[in-house]
């Protein structure tokens, strides 16, 4: 019977330990939870209406807005998320570099969400009714009062950038028309019910600098069925 030398025994122990460590690392890699937050797989939503049938807003403008600004934001958000996923593993990365990308994440997310709400709001006859009209009456007194303030809020952003947003604030439990300077300024804890894009790209092709005429045209095309759907969803989930 062959005897095992001390050196052979130590070598065998080291080899066995290395094998176990490798197996453990492989098992850990196989069971590691994927980073779902930064998948970068957002897909653009199609226009929910016939762009040729809007009143006072041209098909050319809508398609340019959808293809260039909205889809551009979707692509940018995907790129930002993919970069965040890669940079998350760089433990020595300076915070200020990561912070720049987190800022872009906030802005691109806001752009995608608000553009999708904006397009969903279009394609109707502009005549308010249902749960939305009832809520407006309860909080602002009348549709006329609300419309006057909503249009003023939008017109105040004319010639610059931003959004006018009718939203219910879950914290204050109030309905408000909010002024937003850009994609990142939606009021905290508010649920958007109606969104008006006031960036120049949303009206310049049709109206030049006459932003107020675009706001009037938007009001004629509001899809209040979609606004009612948002209000009713908020009511059913006890948000309102």
Image (tube, helix red, strand yellow):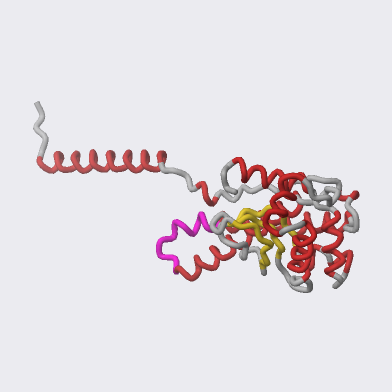
Quadrant of the rendering where the N terminus is positioned:
top left
Please name whichever residue, 188 or 173, is drawn nearer the observer in this view of the structure: 173
- Image vertical order of residue 238 relative to residue 56, above or below: above
The picture quadrant where one finds residue 181 is: bottom right
The picture quadrant where one finds residue 147 is: bottom right
Please name whichever residue, 116 or 21, is drawn nearer the observer in this view of the structure: 116
Residue 40 placement (x, y as % from top left): 59, 51
The residue furthest top is 1
Please name whichever residue, 13 or 187, is drawn nearer the observer in this view of the structure: 187
Task: Judge from the rendering whether residue 114 lies leftward or rightward of residue 24; answer left or right.
Answer: right
Task: Judge from the rendering whether residue 57 lies leftward or rightward of residue 110; answer left or right.
Answer: right
Task: Judge from the rendering whether residue 167 lies leftward or rightward of residue 59; answer left or right.
Answer: left
Task: Judge from the rendering whether residue 87 lies leftward or rightward of residue 77; answer left or right.
Answer: left
- Image vertical order of residue 47 relative to residue 107, above or below: above
Residue 22 placement (x, y as % from top left): 32, 42
The picture quadrant where one finds residue 204 is: bottom right
- Identity of the residue drawn at 36% across and 42% down: 28
- Labels in figure, total: 0
The answer to whether residue 90 is magenta is yes
Residue 135 placement (x, y as % from top left): 69, 51
- The stretch in magenta equals 83-94
Can residue 131 be seen by looking at this rendering? Answer: yes
- Identity of the residue drawn at 54% across and 63% down: 102
Can residue 71 be seen by looking at this rendering? Answer: no
Please name whichever residue, 76 or 125, is drawn nearer the observer in this view of the structure: 125
The answer to whether residue 193 is magenta is no
- Identity of the residue drawn at 76% across and 57% down: 142
Residue 143 placement (x, y as % from top left): 78, 56
- Identity of the residue drawn at 82% across and 63% down: 215
């Amino acid at each position: 019977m062959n005897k095992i030398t001390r050196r052979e025994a130590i070598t065998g122990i080291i080899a066995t330990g290395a094998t176990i460590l490798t197996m453990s690392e492989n098992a850990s890699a196989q069971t590691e939870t994927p980073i779902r937050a930064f998948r970068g797989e957002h897909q653009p939503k199609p226009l929910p209406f016939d762009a040729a049938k809007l009143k006072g807003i041209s098909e050319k403008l809508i398609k340019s807005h959808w293809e260039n600004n909205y889809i551009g934001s979707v692509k940018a958000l995907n790129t930002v998320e993919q970069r965040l996923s890669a940079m998350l593993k760089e433990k020595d990365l300076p915070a200020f570099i990561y912070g720049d990308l987190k800022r872009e994440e906030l802005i691109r997310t806001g752009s995608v969400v608000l553009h999708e709400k904006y397009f969903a709001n279009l394609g109707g006859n502009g005549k308010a009714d249902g749960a939305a009209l009832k809520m407006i009456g309860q909080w602002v007194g009348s549709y006329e009062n609300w419309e006057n303030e909503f249009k003023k809020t939008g017109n105040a952003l004319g010639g610059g950038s931003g959004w006018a947003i009718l939203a219910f604030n879950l914290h204050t439990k109030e309905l408000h028309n909010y002024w937003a300077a850009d994609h990142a300024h939606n009021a905290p804890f508010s649920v958007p019910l109606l969104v008006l894009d006031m960036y120049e790209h949303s009206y310049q092709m049709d109206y030049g600098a006459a932003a107020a005429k675009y706001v009037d045209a938007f009001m004629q095309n509001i899809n209040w069925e979609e606004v009612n759907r948002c209000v009713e969803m908020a009511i059913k989930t006890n948000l309102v």
